[in-house]
Image (tube, rainbow, N blue to C red):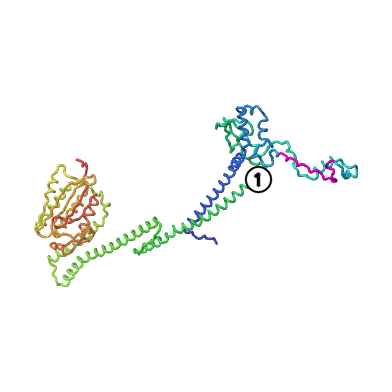
Amino acid sequence: MSLRLPRLKLQHKAFFALAVLLVALLLVFLGFSRLGLQRGLGPYMAEVELTGMDGLAERLVQHHEQNGGWDAARANPGFWRDMVRPGAGMGRGFPAGEPGPRPPMPTPMPMPEPRPGFEGSHGPGPGPEFPPPPGPEGGEPADRSDRSERSDRTDRPDRPGPPPDRPFGGPWARVGLLDAQGQLISGMAPQPGAAHRVLRAANGQAIGEIVLSPVQTGQGMQRDLDRAFLAQQMGFVAWTGLAGLLLALLLSAWLTRRWLEPLTAFVDGLRGIAAGRLDTRVAIKGDAELARLAETFNDMAVQLATMEASRQRWLADVAHELRTPLSTMRAEVEAVQDAVLPMDDRMALRLHRQIMRLIRLVSDLRVSLDDPQALHGSGHVPVHVLTLLGEALDGARPGFEQVGICLDRSTVDQLAARIPPPLVQGDPHRLHQVFANLLENSLRYTAAGGRLQVSAEIVQMQDRSMLQLRWDDTAPGVASQHLPRLFDRLYRVDASRVRDGDGLGGSGLGLAICRTIVQAHGGSIEAAASPLGGLRITLWLPLLENPAP
């Protein structure tokens, strides 16, 4: 049976990753700290020892002034030993265990005069005589001087004697003298990490240097002391690092929980959206990044809810648009079946018109659902767009004349006569469909006896030539609150305004189709109130800059 480890959460993974990183950093810090202490302890101690050699520095400066340089020092082999030998009066900084000059003996105090009758053996005069102590092994008494020497040897065995004649050691064995050019005069040549002390004459000029090399590895007791000091410092560094590591781990645990715990809310929100609960929202405050992410998520949920509501509304509108002609056709067919109405030419014409309305509605739905990007470039060729517009106006003229609407196209004819004429890269069939829809919209909504003015103009927009076309009709107009939605699918301001002359009515898709086609040609279209009292539709199409001949 294999042991399956539980899957770690992202929060735990982040914490463990930070913990491993912090431990690695601590180990690297301890290693570099140990290396730094090992390499820096010797030079530091050399600096400390060198600051205590004031007496040597003074004597060297004095020697230089008296001899006018270091030539005498170079010529005297015993110069350096005389300078640093024990007992040479080094003053402050002389090593422990190598005493300086002994202080002068105090002046002996005068002995008091003996009282009469009490003169002893220590002074002249009569007095009782005490026999001397017997000599060794019962022999003759020992001589007084011999007794005195024996007393000195036995009574005060720890009394220090004169300093032995031995080589100097300690820091004096590691010190050297350099001239102003850095050349060795006497003593030990400087080693890596050596401490330097500049010697200056009375006028402040540098005359040389005292150099003290650090203690080298493996020099007995000094190395043991170094190790003890290093161990003590490393222990302090290790405990400090562990305390910092613990604090960093606690902070990492708090931060990972604070940063990653909100992801649970996002996961729950996404699951709610996936389940169709589009009213799901995420409430996160605090960090700017997380709050911005929550705001973006909520905006996405609002957009999805709006799109879903629009889809439901659109489906309801399509069902209603399809149900109306189908219901009419069903009623008429059932009436014919029940012999209520005769199946004559008039009935056949009504059924044909209902069928055409259904075909037109389905076609309009398909075009309105096309993506403008999918239509872009499909069958596009250079088009004499004003000529195309003139043909659409010619085809619509009889319908406008029938209801008494005046059609003004003067500016279109003037601009179309320009040589060369303005060209647009586009699909002639689609552009003709736009013009036909706009003319039909004006014919359906403009009151009888009104006026439609179609104008054309070339304008500059963002350093590009654009063809501007306008449809201005007379009353009735459109309220301002309805203007932004005129290009929505199946949107109609008022069904009672639809002209019933042809029996077909409007599907509410004409302007939506126009917007789709115009955007596919790189243009734009908008609706506004017309100065003539009705509706103004303006569209812009990009012109070819350098059309081919």
Q: Is 109 one of the magenta-colored residues? A: yes
Q: Nearer the viewer, residue 480 or 206?
A: 206
Q: Nearer the viewer, residue 340 or 14?
A: 14
| Percent position of residue 200, x then y | 57, 33
Residue appearing at x 20%, y 55% in the figure: 527
Magenta-colored segment: predominant secondary structure: loop
User: Which quarter of the figure is the N terminus placed in?
Assistant: bottom right
| Percent position of residue 18, x then y | 49, 54
Disc 1: which residue: 224
| Percent position of residue 399, x then y | 11, 57
User: Which quarter of the figure is the C terminus placed in?
Assistant: top left
Residue found farthest to the front: 116
Q: Is residue 488 visible?
A: yes
**Left or right, residue 17 beside residue 125:** left
Q: Nearer the viewer, residue 504 or 115?
A: 115
Q: Is residue 133 visible?
A: no
Q: Is residue 381 above or below residue 396?
A: above
Secondary-structure class at tag 1? helix
Residue found farthest to the right: 139
| Percent position of residue 123, x then y | 83, 41
Q: Quadrant of residue 293?
A: bottom left
Q: Is 110 one of the magenta-colored residues? A: yes
Residue appearing at x 58%, y 45% in the figure: 37
**Left or right, residue 531 beside residue 77:** left
- The residues colored magenta run 104-124
Q: Residues within 10 Å of mark 1 (few under 14, many from 20)?
A: few
Q: Is residue 68 above or below residue 479?
A: above
**Left or right, residue 372 beside residue 345:** right
Amino acid on which disc 1 is placed: Asp
Q: How many marks?
A: 1
